[in-house]
Image: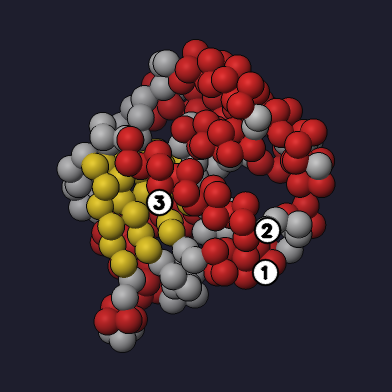
Amino acid sequence: MLPYRFIAIEGNIGAGKTTLCEMLSADMDCHLILEQFSDNPFLPLFYNDPQRYAFSVELFFMTERHQQLQESLTQPELLNTVSIADYFFIKTLIFAKNNLTEAEYRLFRRLFKVLNATFPKPDLLIYLHRPVSQLVANIQKRGRSYEAKLEEDYLLQIQQAYFNYFKSETNIPILILELEDVDFVNNPFFYKQIVSYISKPYSKGIHKIAFTHKIRDQQ
């Protein structure tokens, strides 16, 4: 049993966060919260013309995430259930800061603060870290046409934005899993390792676990 009520699993594009959430939810009978990114009509337009559609795509994401989390985390019947989400609401601000102009971001941040005021923070925030080269390989493998134009520089910017946030967040435990090219879907050993790590209690602040060659050799 997980020692948390609300776990958010974050990561860069292509890190495997949704897949891990689905596996954990199925194994542990958790309430699953998955971001409905495919419903964003501005997303394909944004990948083709980021400057023009950045504010629209981020505003849509923010309102949709807010509504979904508000509905999911306030249901009385879920008070004694572990909830696992493949995003944390702060993701809204991380991507917006990277994608918007300075003036747009100032306005966006004001709106975000209003919506974020009543949200509970996760009891554990997990970040799946992979090298950008592996992210690109994963993105290509899943074959979403609107992601075809994603560049490594953009993924690096998003990665750095997450790390900058982690340095400023001192009120919750943050577990960074450095996965490299670990395939936890097809290799049960790695999945069990992840489960064992997230089943432990952690103090507030950053905690890092690297899947080293030593761990790999045990499979």
* Label 2: which secondary element: loop
CB atoms of marks 3 and 2 within 8 Å: no
Q: Residues within 10 Å of mark 3 (few under 14, many from 20)?
A: many
Mark 3: which amino acid? Tyr
Of 30 and 158, the residue lying toward us = 158
Q: Is residue 38 visible?
A: yes
Tell me the residue at 71%/34% (across/down): 54
Of 181 and 7, the residue lying toward us = 181
**Residue wearing tag 2:** 151
CB atoms of marks 3 and 1 within 8 Å: no
**Residue wearing tag 3:** 127
Q: Earlier in the sequence, mark 1 or mark 2?
A: 1
**Label 3 to label 1: alpha-carbon separation:** 21 Å
Tell me the residue at 60%/17% (across/down): 107
State the mark number for residue 197: none
Q: Residues within 10 Å of mark 1 (few under 14, many from 20)?
A: few
